[in-house]
Image (cartoon, rainbow, N blue to C red):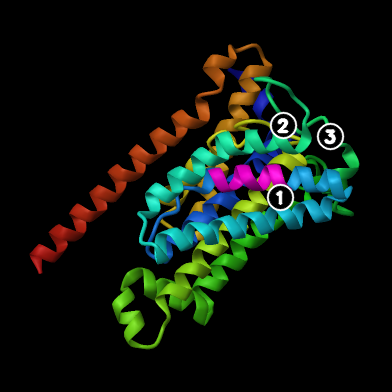
Amino acid sequence: MLNFLKMLLTPEFFFSIIRISAPILFATLAAIVVEKAGFCNIGLEGLMMFSALTGSLVSYYAQSWVWGLLAALAIGVLMSLMMGFFAFQLKTDITLVGIAINMMGSGGTLFLCKVITNLTKGTSMASSTGLINSNLLIPSINIPLIDKIPFLGSIISGHNLLTWVAFLCCALTSVMLYKTSLGLNIRAVGENPNAASSVGVSVLKIKYIAIGFSGLMCGFGGAFMSMYYAAGWSLDMVAGRGFIALAAQAMGGGECLGGMLSSLVFGFAQALGIKFSAVGLDSNLASPIPYAVTIIGLVIFSLVRRSRAKKLHSAAALK
């Protein structure tokens, strides 16, 4: 047991928790904003897959990680707005639209990778990892002075640029939701769209802004995965992070701070699974750990929320 704790209480392990949490946090912020606007975007997984593929391919053909990142963000926003068009204009159930995006993100990206790169033939697996070199990856940042601090410096310094962007976006999203008129309109539309419309708020416009924002966050998450974490795109590389983000949003109570803490919990679970695999535990036992934590966390969250609801109901009945 003592050796196990020593294995976990290392700067490398804490560093990996933060690194792994970043793409989950991006997707969690996407889920939070659309939930505030009154709907759920379950297509986060597919949006991240398309963004990851686009970012890696554009960075290769443009020979610039900057263009790759911008392309990943653009495709995330465009595809999310396309989802909005089908859901808001054509009145398609947004859950079905999200399912379609996820299915396209799995099979469609594989097809596009094969067609665009011509790297594989027949039924061979396509991947862009062989195209991406270190110059095309989003850079990491060593923070002067902090990187000299024992233990803490190794945890904080050296992270990828998008890791810091994820936590910055968390703070900025919270400010946007609660300190700006746009955030007020988003929350108003989510709580009562008819009332919001009666005071001049364009419900349709606000919903498009919310789903476009979710696409932007998924663009960041997808770019992180293919242009840093995995150094290229491969099939199903997002590995359920879009769905984990939905759980993180629920466990965090739909708030940015709670979502960030939930993302770190899931990051810890995944880092733990990787550590178990590294010390010899069967990967078939280690890899499900993050998903098991997701289920356990949601069960605990549901029980706590139900308990609080009963207490509030009892208190209201006494009055």
Separation of disc 3 and disc 1 at Cα? 23 Å
Magenta stretch: includes residue 51 = yes
**Residue 10 numbered mark, or none:** 2
Whole-percent x and y of residue 52?
68, 44
- Residue at 68% from the left image edge and 31% from the top image edge: 234
Q: Is residue 276 above or below residue 240?
A: above
Q: Reading the chain from its start, which is encountered first: label 3 or label 1?
A: 3
Q: Reading the chain from its start, which is encountered first: label 3 or label 2?
A: 2
Whole-percent x and y of residue 270?
58, 31
The kind of residue on which mark 2 rests is Thr
- Pointer 3 residue: 131
**Residue 163 numbered mark, or none:** 1
- Residue at 63% from the left image edge and 61% from the top image edge: 169
Q: Quadrant of residue 154?
A: top right
Between residue 240 and residue 280, name the one nearer to us. Answer: 240
Separation of disc 3 and disc 2 at Cα? 33 Å
- Residue at 50% from the left image edge and 66% from the top image edge: 210
Between residue 35 and residue 2, name the one nearer to us. Answer: 35
Q: Reading the chain from its start, which is encountered first: label 1 or label 2?
A: 2
- Does any portion of residue 112 appear in the rendered image? yes
